Image (spheres, coloured by chain):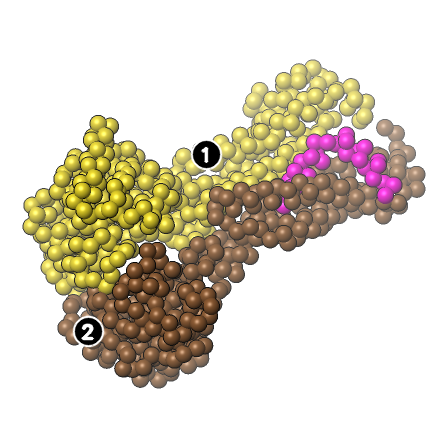
Amino acid sequence: MYRYYFSLALRSLRRNAVLSALMIAAIGVGIGASMTALTVFRAMSGDPIPAKSRQLFTPQIQIRGPNHPDSESEDGLPTAVSYSDAMAWMRARAATRQTATYATWLSVRPPDPKQKPLKTVVRVAYHDFFSMFTVPFKFGAPWTQADDDNRAAVVVLTRGVNDQLFGGVNSVGKTLRLDNETYTVVGVLNDWLPIPRFYDLQMVPFGESDRLLIPFTRAIDREMAVDGSTSCYDESGASFADMLKSNCIWLQFWVELPTPADVAKYRLYLGNYAAEQQRSGRFAWLPRTQLRDVREWLAYRHVVPNEVSLLLLLSFGFLMVCLLNAAGLLLAKLMSRAGDIGVRRALGAPRSAIFAQCLIETATIGLAGGVLGLTLTGLGLLAARSLLDADFVALTHLDWADVGIALGLAVAATLLAGLYPTWRAARVQPAWQLKAS
Amino acid sequence: MSTLEVRPILSTLRRNKFGALLIAAQIAITLGFLANALSIVQFRSSWSSRPTGIDEANIFSIRSDAVSHPPDMASRVSADLASLRGLPGVVDAFADYSYPLAGGGWGSSVHLKPDQETQTTSTAMYFADEHALNTLGVRLIAGRNFRADEITDRRESDSPQTSVLIVTKALADKAFPAGNALGQNLYIESGDHPERIVGIVERLQSFAAASTGPFGETAELSTLLPYRPIDERSDYLVRVQPGRLASVMQAAEQKLFALDNDRILRTRSMAQVRAIAYRGDHGLVILLTSISVALLLVTGFGIVGLTSYWVAQRRRQIGIRRALGASRGDIVRYFQTENLLIAAAGVIGGIAFAIALNLWMVRSFEMLRMDSRWPIGGAIVMLILGQLAVLWPALRAASVPPALATRSA
């Protein structure tokens, strides 16, 4: 019976071709716009490391007095840490794993002399970085604790850089000239791109940037400057060594705390650390401390730009207009068939049958609109990628979940829009219609 | 005539409540989003076309990054600058770490007194030698340019050592609202070493001007310091004679590579810099404009569709009216008046919705308040759209022959 209703629906679509096309176009455009915005929004506001986002934390400490709140954060706490605090936390080893990290900017001389030298962003971290953030390796392995201790000249390449510089072969053991010094490749990553790049929001949080990774201790030893912001209050224009001693903030710090008990212990540790810093005379105030996990950190730092939320809002408003539109057109379409419905009712069709038939017709329209909408979403994403910052809309693509959401949304929304028109159609009085024709 | 028609129209509408309500709601929502979208489009367009204050059409930048660590960067920078200034078509050139709209650069707090607790304001810092003002093409409105003997070489890690500054008018007015900034002392970078303002330029945007918050009041707070950067990375700014930008950009790269091949160069015209800096704004403008046009189209066609249905439904009644003496014009006017009534109701709701939506966005997205001309302009657009959309079905209705009334039911 439903097959029959479906073929009736198709026939009716053909009979009212213009009205049907208008409806399908309206639903398609609405779905296309809102799905484009939703896909971008989902990609940007997603959890970059779902398996561990509740176990990775970043500590904050109020390094400047209560009179100098950080203007960029809502609670006034600085969003980076100083070298001296980071080193104290590294030494304390109060967490299961920990790493201080920053980005620097180094020149790379490709092994192939025909390739031009290039400048690239280099991630600087401790060896725990790889296991904490479950970074996948294609070749080799992370550097070791000993490499950290010895400030070793070792480097881990991302897959893209390995393809570019070594033609994609296993380059472990080969050397690379970085900033005019020779580094040994110890590992090559597999594809790895957390969106957003939660572990260092000083950098643009979307898109590719870290291309090489080297030990933190090596970078400090060679006085590699931070590529990002350094915020100093009193100290300025100082040498790198002075900066390390200062209260300038420029580092990110992450700890892994697997259980709630570990978290509680670490909070206690931070509190004690702050109190001890006050006692030692470094601060005239008791510094507030804070510990946020990945999701809390992303929300706190507002990584999703206002523009994206705004577009999401507008496009759903747009979908609403399209649906109101479809509702009106459906009413027109179904009511223009009141005569047919009257005949069917007179021949014995119960209201529920009419209702089911109209609903199937509505759902067919919704499905067609959904398919059109998906096509438009694909185009919309292409447009968004070329119009907005490439970094902004990095790697947003449609997956099966999106296809499901789009088709489901289209059918559900159209059915919702068609509810009243369908109800009206089912209430057609057979006698009136027969009399009128 | 038309006043008399309102009453029958209203009683007809009462029988078509749902359809009329749908059109009114569509118009209201469309208007609400349209007014806000256009207000954002207008703001972003004017925001991204604010002048930097420099001769953008004729300026480009070359960033030079040394690959190895060459000794004696000072003489290398001197050689680079000398050959850039010597290129045919070049007006002038200087070296800096940043420039307007570059995105990144050095900032500093500005204090009026040595031991001040909270900063007076903040500023973007540019390095400048005696060629800088001529290269940038900024207008000096008070005081003087730096003298050659005031310029010192400075690495990023060196301590500040200057005692003179050139500031923008915006910074001068902010620090000295009385207007007596020239000759006064500021404390920039260091808290205990004063620098005297020797010149004021009309306008020079900060490197971060594209992202200075919705009100942009810090966009023009910039300071020029009499230093020549001698680090391994510097941005050369080059001003060319009008019309020679593309050719000089190429020649400049070749020249610098000829001096030293072991470096990485990145050349950008100011037009490219501006496009990159405002890419997000530009994209938003295009997306919002497209959504607005699509909204209008969808609403317009929705009105066409529903009115066509009403016309089809009332063919007999129209025939009767025509038979009773109504002219074609009367029929067209009937549908136009009907649409006007529905649209007017929608527009009233839409203005309220537009304002409410704007207030909410101001609160949650740091958006500016909407100018009242946007909802009013949007309302007029919606009324016109309704009239246009209803025209075709109304003309179809007018073509219903009076004879239809005589045919039996």
A209 in relation to B335, above or below: below
Quadrant for the N terminus of chain B in the image: top right
A416 in relation to B381, above or below: above
| Crowd rating for badge 1 (residues with CA inside 10 Å; few <14, some 14–19, many 20+) | some
Between tags 2 and 1, which lies in front?
Answer: 2
Quadrant for the C terminus of chain B in the image: top right
Dominant SS in magenta: helix
- Gap in angstroms between the C-alphas marked 2 and 1: 59 Å
**Residue in the picture at 23% in, 30% down:** A264
Q: In the rendered image of this protein, which colour is used for chain A?
A: yellow
Whole-percent x, y for residue A435 in the image: 81, 22
> The chain shown in brown is which?
B
Identify residue type, mark 1.
Ile
Whole-percent x, y for residue B158 in the image: 21, 67
Query: Residue B41 colored magenta?
Result: no
Q: Mark 1 highlights which residue?
A: A405
Magenta segment range?
Answer: B3-31
B26 in relation to B112, above or below: above
Whole-percent x, y for residue A145 in the image: 9, 43
Is residue B238 among the parts visible in the rendering? no
**Front residue of this view, candidates B180 and A257:** B180
**Front residue of this view, candidates A13 and A312:** A312
Query: Residue B27 colored magenta?
Result: yes
**Occupied quadrant, residue B68:** bottom left
Is residue A363 among the parts visible in the rendering? yes
**Front residue of this view, candidates B310 and B104:** B104
Residue B73's disc is 2
